[in-house]
Amino acid sequence: MASTEWDLQRIARSALIIAVAAAAVWILWRFLPALAWACVLAIATWPLRQTLARRGLGRTGAAAMLTLVLAVVLVMPLIGIGIEGAHDGGAIMAWIHDVRQNGLGTPDWLARVPVIGETLSTWWQANLSPPGAARSMFGHAETSGIISFTRTLGVEVASRLTILVFTLLALFFLYRDGPSLMEEAHAIADRLFGPPGGHLGRNAVAAVRATVNGLVFVGLGEGVLLGITYWAVGMHHVILLTLATGVLAAVPFGAPVIFVGAALFLLAESQTTAAIVILVVGFLVVFVADHFIRPILIGSSTRLPFLWVLLGIFGGLETFGLIGVFLGPAIMSVLIAIWREGAKTPEPAAS
């Protein structure tokens, strides 16, 4: 009888825990991306937080300083992109107005493209060079299209800023209360899963930190190298292109979106040599980063084979968005750790 009562209590307790957890997820659903980003940033920068705390700042001081530094690092590029975009908006509209009035001239290099150059040049002269054709293409660009795009962009910017504010707020409390939270999480993992629970948690943390090192820092390095290339060939808006390249380079094969676009722009300006230089340097940098540096940084820390690193990154990106780039390898790391733990030959029992 006592055993049956105990089983009923355990079932009721488990049901209550599941119901409360589901309600909490439902309430926090819109803020889960902010909490996930805060966890990723806290894990990646935790050694720096520990260093600051040991140097006399204390938990609160170290949390406040590091949160402020990260806020500046995250917000300043956004402000720079916004200023550049506002500065160039007038020039873009003037260019559209000029194209509508005078047409879009055929680039000199287009006719020299092998096999299809003459066909492309003829099509361009017929469809883009005449003022009437260009006017029909850009007819509504200055009115309804721009207004609609601006409204959508404003909503997206407001949403991202809200996530950023809550990310920084959650990050401060993670920095301040992180040690106690980790002790409690370790105790709960030991109670639920036994000793392997803490090992799986450490694998996930190591995977997140290694992924940040392998993606973010290597991406910033790609941005710097390609920024030097942009400057060397005389591209305009070098700082904006460098920032955009560094941000997209955090995703494998993301940097080509920027430098290929820059090369196409140079081709349209008949600067063929500069375009070839950007393409060669860009693909060389991306090849070395994605095939050698990133797998070493991520795989060596997590003991993940390169295939699982790649699947974790792209699968996480497809499933969870940008935050999945960091969550995917962490989940793969826990999965491989469980696999290896289960594949171990059990030690024979002592007789």
Image: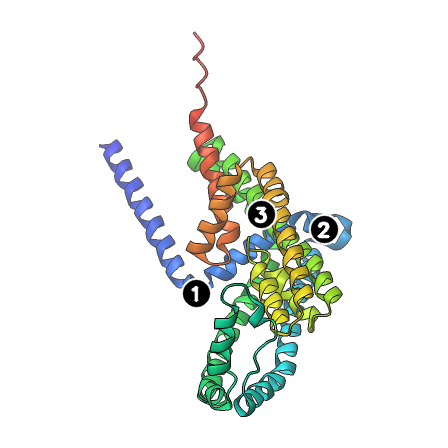
Find disc 2 in the rendering and name its residue: 53
Quarter of the image for the N terminus: give it.
top left
Whether residue 283 sits left or right of residue 228 in the image: it is: left
Q: Is residue 37 left or right of residue 12?
A: right
The one of 59 and 106 positioned closer to us in this rendering: 106
Q: Is residue 234 at all visible to an observer of this figure?
A: yes
Q: Amino acid at mark 3?
A: Thr
Q: Secondary structure at mark 3?
A: helix
Q: Are marks 3 and 1 in contact (CB under 8 Å)?
A: no
Q: Quadrant of residue 69?
A: bottom right
Task: Please give the label number shown on residue 211.
Answer: 3
The image shows residue 20 at horizontal and vertical percentages of 36, 54
Q: CA distance from mark 2 to mark 1?
A: 32 Å
Residue at (43%, 31%) from the top-left corner? Answer: 339
Dot 1: element: helix
The residue beneath circle 1 is 30
* Residue at horizontal 34 percent and vertical 49 percent from the top: 18
Q: Judge whether residue 71 can be spotted in this image.
A: no
Type of the residue with mark 2? Ala
Q: CA distance from mark 2 to mark 3?
A: 24 Å
Q: Are marks 2 and 3 in contact (CB under 8 Å)?
A: no
Determine whether the residue tagged by mark 2 lies in a helix, strand or loop: helix
Q: Is residue 215 above or below residue 270?
A: above
Q: Residue at x 71, y 60 (%)?
A: 65
The picture quadrant where one finds residue 272 is bottom right
Residue found 48% across the figure and 39% down from its top:
334
- As drawn, the residue found furthest toward the right would be 55
Closer to the camera, 151 or 39? 151
- Relative side of 195 to 283, left or right: left
Specify which label sits upstream in the sequence, 2 or 1.
1
